[in-house]
Amino acid sequence: MTDSCDRSANLSLLKEPVLRRLCEILDQTTTDKGWRKLGEIVGGDRRFRVSSDDMEMCSLKVLDMEGSPSRALLRLLGERGCTMGHLLDYMQTIGNSEAIQCLKPPGLQILVQPQSVSLISGHKLRLSCYAVGKTPVQYQWFKTKEEVPNSFAPDLMISPVRLQDAGHYICRVNCGDAFEFSQWAQVDVLDTATCHGQSYHSLEGRLRVVVQPQAQRQLLGDTLQLECGAVGKPIPCYQWHRNGVPLPNASKRKLTIPFVMQDHQGRYRCEISSNTERMWSSEVDVLIGPRISVQVSGAMECSEDDIYAFGASGNEFFINNTPEQLHAADKVALLIGNLSYQNHPQLKAPMVDVYDLTNLLRQLNFKVVSLLDLTESEMRNAVDEFLLLLHKGVYGLLYYAGHGYENYGNSFMVPVDAPNPYRSANCLCVQSILKLMQEKETGLNVFLLDMCRKRNIHDETTPNIVLRVTANIVFGYATCQDAEAFELSSSGFTNGVFVKFLKKRLLDDEKITVVLDRVAEDMGQFDATKGKQALEIRSSLSERRALTDPVLPGDSADMTLAHSRQWAKVHELPETMRLNFDCGAQIKLGFAAEFSNVLVIYTHIVKKPDDMSFCQAHVTDFSLDLDVDPKEMNRQTPEETGIYLLSSNLPQHCLYTRLSSLQKLREELVFTVCLQGAFAALGDETVHWTRSVDIGKPLVARLDLHRAMRCNSCLQTCPMPHSPSHSPCHSPGSERHLHHHHQQQQLAHGRLSPHCPSPYLEVYEPLHGAMGGGGVYRHRDNLSASRASGDAAGAAVAGSPGGPSIPIETTEDINELQAVFISSLQLQQRH
């Protein structure tokens, strides 16, 4: 027997060097991968059952001179007939890769296994298998039992991937006379024709629903087919539900019922999961109608074809008497979160809230533009771009988190550059935006305003905005009229009070007002803000419009396509690139979007010369428009550079740089990649190489929001004299008014002061993201709250959220949240 193992050989035949090394690994490894975990798993195997007495005997070996519990356990297993193959399987189960390498033949090892994946046709498929051996390794890919032509590389690339490329793949690795097969990888390819015009810009591996089931009307005996599809790595799992109950043997992407009965009628949706991610498809109605008999010179039973032969459709009555499912011509959402105010208290929660709502709305097939920290002109230009995406029948949703106020029934959103005090001329009026949306004949207008609604005593203007009387307007205010909104301030990253509860209900297939009603009920049970903040809903909605309604472009398909191209501009990322340097090193440059105006750049050295003793690469020389702090660039972890929300989706072992405020970029983004290296032959003296990189205008920079306000700005709807009674939908957004108070708000520790106009209990900062010292309630209003009120808490929230470099993970349990934060509440007024 050699030092490498024979799977059929007994453990007692392990040579001493291998046994000694294996025992060192198992003795020193943590309990979840060490000898105790091994004993626990073997204890459940009837062939080599290990009792608790056996484990105690092994543990006592630590009292012996150079005693080893692992050696005692392995000797016991060998005596009971355990083989090398069994031990390898156990090590694979507990994930102890170091022990596996000790046991596996050193001649050939597969280090990277191909992963199952689901993707859209037309995209690029890449399966990877990487192995090492004593001699050069050769690869051959197979699809099922057939060899894939010209597939002799570690990476199997198919671009563009087609429907016929779906299937199971495996790679055979040869090294001399030895060979091994990789794991099987399933490839699921979704048909672009069923994706309803969606674009796919998510990061590789992130789960996303791209094919939604469609409502069905069937006759008794017909075949029912429902289809759902998601992209992601690993490949998603599916479970269909009817009326909220899981269906047995319905765990495939396509649900087929060959002969439907009346019992099959109901509401269907599919649960989709991948690793720790879980989401739902849209919920659709399946209606089953009876086959009818027709009277022709007496009663006779007719088939559907017979009925058509008589000139009448047998299911005409069924179809005409079934309420038509409501749908959207398109779905568009603009999400704005203002945190880094220049003249007012900083916020923290808006960043987290905008990020979470972006992901949820995309699951509902919304085209989402998410922006942070906009000035007045940038906000107005962003709204103009949002309006360009609207047309007849479109569902338009505007979410705003930040400082705000409400005067005379009109709501105003406060930009980050608003002066102190601010007035309506410095802010955006929500009702003026609604007026412009109505001119587009939208199918549904939803405003979610996460801001204070206090009156602004510095603003006496009364703009008159005459709205049309329509039955498609919904306002969800995070707080009541003339009240503040709060956000919970903590050392980590948490949602605002409103979004904390909204995100749990947003995917429900219910009328939007019903969803908001349930959110209001949930918020009412939250002790931290009970009696201080309550959700207010204003609606003129007369139909059962829901955010889950399907998208059916209809006659406006060409217009939808044109608007989709406009929307796609905001989401175009630079292609990943590889830079080759004269020294022989190669650098990989990758890009990701945290928000529509926040770009992440990551660099990784993929190849360096063997004789290079030191090699490092970083990016530098960015446009002054972006105001990038060199101290926060090229960090070894995403959190160190402010990338908190996207960090788990980024590749590891890179250097990361976060570029925010891309809307300020006036020219194409050009920067320098600098490589530093040293060679032992040259005395380890550091040598520099540089490459200039031009990635154009990424993401929202393409829209030039930095330009002066455009002639069609929503500002043009505001100058008329105003009478509140003229507005049919009493300015829904005003409630979240960030009231500028000329008196400094006093801080009350452990209680909420009844005197202060606290805009957002810093349970979450008013603007969705205010961040302060440990456990502070902050308002999302306040024109004049003094800097002293903000003290350390306000300072901690400046710019990108402060606090520790790695955020504390927040619990979803409301009681635990209350226990942690209520003990140290502090009211901070927001200007």
Image (cartoon, rainbow, N blue to C red):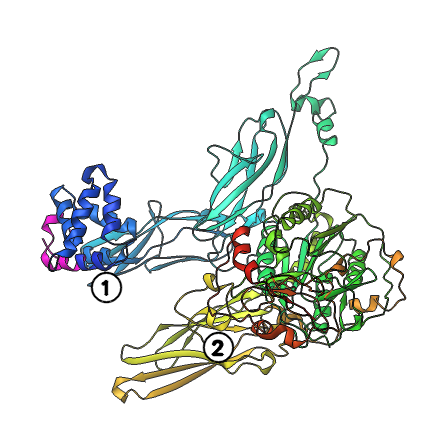
767 shown above or below 53? below
- Vertical relation: 603 (above or below) 1: below
- Residue 8 placed where, x, y %? 15, 45
The image quarter containing residue 549 is top right
Q: Label 1, label 2: how many angstroms apart (C-alpha)?
A: 39 Å
Left or right of residue 265: residue 813: left
Please state which amino acid type lies under the numbered disc 1.
Answer: Pro
Residue 495 among magenta residues: no
Q: Position of residue 394 (x, y in %)?
A: 72, 52
Q: Residues within 10 Å of mark 1 (few under 14, many from 20)?
A: few
Q: Position of residue 32 (x, y in %)?
A: 30, 53
Q: Judge by depth and name the residue closer to the eye, 769 or 598.
A: 769
Q: Nearer the viewer, residue 751 or 166?
A: 751
Write the start and end of the magenta stretch as one range. 1-22
Q: How many marks?
A: 2
Visible residue check, residue 9:
no
Task: Evaluate if marks 1 and 2 touch, with contact meaning CB atoms under 8 Å apart.
Answer: no
- Residue lying farthest to the top in this orientation: 298
- Asked which secondary structure carries label 1, the reply is loop
**Neighbours of disc 2 within 10 Å: few (<14), some (14-19), many (20+):** many
Can the viewer see residue 784?
A: yes
Q: Residue at x 23, y 60 (%)?
A: 28
Q: Which residue is denoted by mark 2 in the rendering?
A: 633
Residue 12 belongs to the span the image colors magenta: yes
Residue 702 horizontal/vertical position (percent): 63, 71
Q: Please name the residue that numbered disc 1 is placed on.
A: 136
